Image: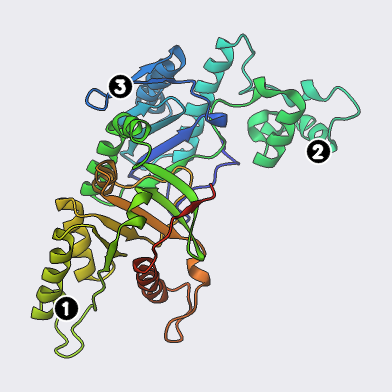
Amino acid sequence: MNAPFYRPRNAGHDYYDRGVYLITLVIGGRAPLLGALGDDPKHPEVQLSPLGEKVRQEWETIPARQKSHGNKVAVLTSVCMPDHFHGVIEVLEPMQWSLGDIIQAFKATCTSYWQAQQGQPSSTNRPISVDCTNASTPVWLCEKALDHHSEGSLIRALSQKQRKEYYALTGRQYRPLFDDNYDDTVCLDERHRKAMIDYVNDNPRRAILRRVLPDVMRRSLHVKIGNRSYGAFGNLFLLRWANKVQVQCHRRHPVSGLLYETTDDYVRQHDEWVSQVMKGATVVVTPGISRGELQMKNECLKKGYPLIHLQKEPIGPYWKPERNRFEACARGNLLVLAPWNLDDMDPVAGVPSDSDYSRFHNLNALAAELCSFTGDATILR
């Protein structure tokens, strides 16, 4: 089985070999077909629909199904959210199939069940020739329909662009349950593996908190702050705080050459930052890049100090912070900002702006701007 429309997230990674992966699948149109989310973060749960229960069961049967194909895999955990699915899967031995093949087989089975629920014939193996019935049929579709020497005559063999045109011709009932592509995160080490599993298991609680705490758990893709645009997640009210203090440190002391966070100068700076926070109405602003900045950022997260954290990674429609920053957002203590067009800012010391060196310096320049900002952010979307 081929998956011609699958584009792996990690180019160059061997998806036939051993590995642990966090898989995210999104229901087409974000329709809440898999269940209903509760409203108590202390007892988080998703009441699964019959379709959601079937999706969960199909995920659990992947190891047995793949064993019959000679592939050895294990599913470590999963959760059906109303409009998306998360699962962690481990490839135990090198396979004849790729991870993409396994996920596409899972998606196809779920789609067939969903279509059967609606009284529709399964589109997984539907010949596209049945839809070449009039003069308006695109030429490429008729050519595909006549390709009987391969899977070219089946829907699953169409490219993403071709299938979009095909579904516009035939109607919604033949579209798959899940969006075409999916997200796969490759596990880096044992700590990352645990974090993946914890993230999946904690998803219902996180979703409930985002719903019941909208003011401090807001995701905004385009926020205007002064003359700059940012993606944002968290408590935008922190921008209006009376005092902001920038935490910026050298990697090494400019005189002694020692690691800056080990010097007396860092201790004095640290004590001054904490003193300002403890006086009240002061929020720390930092990208947390150098070791000293990172230590202060982590101290803010641990102790509940108000923090505006700038990051180079963009904030998209499905972006979520990791657990410690998520919990800080839930307490109202954190705003995460990701500047738009960071790589279009000026080069630093002649180093191109899209290098880490210039990005880090430009993030600190933005932190300085935010410390002098006194107005309201404009949420564009």
Residue 15, percent from left and from top: 43, 46
Residue indicated by mark 2: 140
Query: Which amino acid type corresponds to the residue marked 3 in the rendered image?
Result: Glu
Name the one closer to the observer, 76 or 365. Answer: 365
Of the numbered discs 2 and 3, the one sitting upstream in the chain is 3
Residue indicated by mark 1: 260
The answer to which image quadrant residue 164 occupies is: top right
Q: The N terminus appears in which quarter of the rendering?
A: top right
Residue indicated by mark 3: 45
Residue 322, percent from left and from top: 30, 47
Residue 315 shows up from this direction: yes
The answer to whether residue 380 is left or right of residue 167 is left
Query: Which amino acid type corresponds to the residue marked 2 in the rendered image?
Result: Trp
Alpha carbon separation for disc pair 1 and 2: 64 Å
Count every numbered label the image shows and give the total: 3
Of the numbered discs 1 and 2, the one sitting upstream in the chain is 2
Residue 364, percent from left and from top: 35, 72
The answer to which image quadrant residue 4 occupies is: top right
Count neighbours of disc 2 (C-alpha within 10 A) and say few if under 14, some if 14 to 19, many if 20 or more.
few
Name the one closer to the observer, 204 or 273. Answer: 273
SS at badge 1? helix
Give above or below for 29 relative to 38. below
